[in-house]
Amino acid sequence: MRITGYRTLTTIQEWARPVGDANGVFADGVTSVPLVLVDTDEGFTGVGIGSHAGIEHVFGAIEGEDPRAVTALYDRMLRHAFKAGHAGTVFATIGALDTALWDLKAQAADEPLWRFLGGRDRIVPAYASGLDIGLGDEDLAAAYRVYAERGLRAAKLKGGLDVEADRRRLGIVRDVLVEAGTARPGLMLDANETWSRKQAVRHVREIESTMDLIWIEEPVRRWDAEGLGVVQRGVRAAVATGENLTGIEQFRPLLQAGAVDVVQTAAVGGVTHFLRVAALAHAFDLPVSPIGNVPVGLLHAATSVPNHLVSELQDLRPPVGVTADLDIEDGAFVLGDTPGLGLTVHTGAIAGLGREPGPADPAGPGVRPARAGLQLLATTLRAQRDTTDRSPARRGLEETEAPPASRRAPAT
């Protein structure tokens, strides 16, 4: 079997609600989902979800090769990109191609990828993650009731801008999960790198004075091993990070510093990257947890590693024009028996969309707030408004983050 070419296309995820984090919100609830299709001379097509950036250059590393040599081809792609740096969107392109190659390899073996990789069980434990910072209290509760109906008993909220709002919103989700029959729900908070070291400790400690957290995610900058260690030693919650690291070499200093409790990798990093990071984490007796929307490749891979903890479940539906052979039952992903990843891309449906996400607001998403990392105390939104950028775009984000007073529930 030989790789003959690739196709790129972009579909959308329709969330039916605002989605975002401390760095911005997509108010219309529509986000882009890039896809890569890798074709072969034997009629198999592999599917990868990730970036297209630099694909013309990176694809030269695998064109004409046998896709079953996937791990060697992964390193070959890294070598092609090393001069400019295999980071950011280029790393995501390599991950998308890598995932497509694993899809091809398992298809050629006529096995689902989870079994091909050595997994024994098709069930992958999940937690709910609503990308929910733009939701008011009532909508927040409604969103997590949908997850609870599928058996999810742990939830991760976006926060970091207002300690009082974070505590209140965590309490709302906790109560939803208790009503669904969970005696002690698992709660996590994701700050998306918006804090300084001291602010992170103060913020989390204030929350921990009234409730328990499983983990705090990305409390400080992704590369700050010393700062992550400060947070890890200063709070009860575990520290989770790694989704934005783009090479196994970037994990090593964090693990050696004892700065991480839960090692994460993003779905766009690819299967080979996840397997290598999982092995490195296992050497430090640390668990791994994949994150991202539609993390299908990493779900299959998670069945084969001994230190998988739990995987992130964002939307219950796949992107438009994509179907997946998996279900969500009893709080877990249940992988199917379709050979490969079990993803089917309906190119006609995507071509006929006629809709793409609009340009991102200049103040977000994906734009770090101007005062991020420059606070020491756990801030309230009122205090932050006194110091932050007051552009119209930023004011709109703040209004989204702070529901009207009439909709606020008492702090718990």
Image (cartoon, helix red, strand yellow):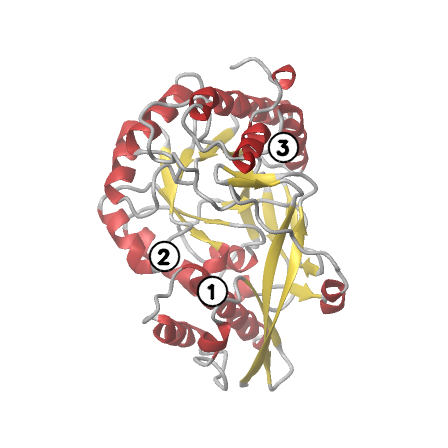
The residue identified by callout 1 is 95
The residue identified by callout 2 is 277
Q: Position of residue 110 (x, y in %)?
A: 60, 74
- In the image, taking residue 355 as reference, residue 295 lies left or right, namely left
Q: Is residue 174 above or below residue 33?
A: above
Query: Quick one: 119 or 103, which is closer to the camera?
Result: 103
Q: Is residue 204 above or below residue 35?
A: above
Residue 183 seen in this snapshot: no
Label 1 is placed on what type of residue? Gly
Q: Residue at x 49, y 83 (%)?
A: 63
- Which SS class for mark 3? helix
The residue identified by callout 3 is 144
Q: CA distance from mark 1 to mark 2?
A: 13 Å
Q: CA distance from mark 3 to mark 2?
A: 30 Å
Q: CA distance from mark 1 to mark 3?
A: 30 Å
Residue 228 sits in quarter: top left
Asked if disc 3 and disc 2 are in contact, CB closer than 8 Å, the reply is: no
